[in-house]
Amino acid sequence: GNSVTQMEGPVTLSEEAFLTINCTYTATGYPSLFWYVQYPGEGLQLLLKATKADDKGSNKGFEATYRKETTSFHLEKGSVQVSDSAVYFCALSPYGATNKLIFGTGTLLAVQP
Amino acid sequence: KAGVTQTPRYLIKTRGQQVTLSCSPISGHRSVSWYQQTPGQGLQFLFEYFSETQRNKGNFPGRFSGRQFSNSRSEMNVSTLELGDSALYLCASSPVAGSTDTQYFGPGTRLTVL
């Protein structure tokens, strides 16, 4: 079946540190991959996405590359800010005519000044 | 363009009651999906509607149901509420139903079952 595994949190970093949140997936075919972010008390916001192998999604300094050979979609940012503190969810949408999203468990990021 | 709106934002119910939640998608979006978010189970897919038809259903009991209207607005209903139904219910919309589509989420309805 389809599933997403992401690293356990919380991740605590100092401002301007480098961020990596690991995400691996299991899926048949060619899923689309997403990173969503959830700020306290809010819904989910799309951070970035990639729809085919070797695609790189990027937004607001965050990047992730769709690696089919390692079934991974790790999230990276070169220099985090306090305002990046949130929960980050990796998700996949199985290939086909569907909008169903399968989420990882989420990783809480806390950035300290 | 207005985002996805969900009403009500907060609800308190007691066990055994039923509840209806509403979701209005972004104008022009025809696909609406629902998710349940709990601390224990995380984010779980409930169902997906496109052009008034349910296209996909998650692994939830029959107490959870939904529908979509001709204007793409969607409702979900939970009957015979249980304590474990306490959760944040999120609705997402997208223009069509395709795996590459970006889904835009609403702020959610926080349901508390006492």
Image (tube, coloured by chain):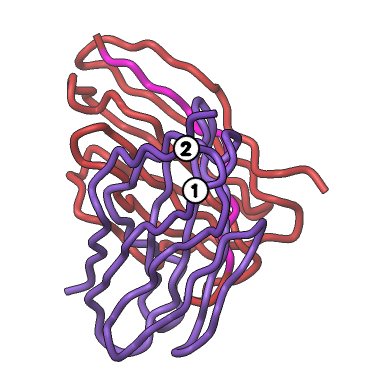
Chain colours: A purple, B red
Q: Position of residue B98 (x, y in %)?
A: 52, 76
Q: Point out the stretch of residues depicted in magenta.
A: B102-113
CA distance for labels 2 and 1:
6 Å
Q: Secondary structure at mark 2?
A: strand
Q: Nearer the viewer, residue A39 or A78?
A: A78
**Residue wearing tag 1:** A17
Quadrant the C terminus of chain A occupies: top right
Q: Which residue is mark 2?
A: A14
Q: Position of residue B82 (x, y in %)?
A: 18, 22
Image side of residue B107 versus residue A75, left or right = right
* Amino acid at pointer 2: Ser
> Height in image: A94 above or below B84?
below
Callout 2 environment at 10 Å: few (<14), some (14 to 19), or many (20+)? some
Q: Nearer the viewer, residue A47 or B45?
A: A47
Residue at 61%, 62% in the rendered image = B94
User: Residue at image x 26%, y 72%?
Assistant: A25
Disc 1 is placed on an element classified as: loop
At horizontal 45% and vertical 54% (from top left) the residue drawn is A19
- Chain for disc number 2: A
Chain of residue at mark 1: A
- Do the residues indicated by labels 2 and 1 lie within the same chain of the protein? yes
Residue type at mark 1 is Ala
Residue drawn at x 38%, y 35% as measured from the top left: B77
Q: Residue B54: x and y, percent?
A: 41, 62
Disc 2 and disc 1 in contact, CB within 8 angstroms: yes
Q: Quadrant of the N terminus of chain A?
A: bottom left
Nearer to me, A79 or B37: A79
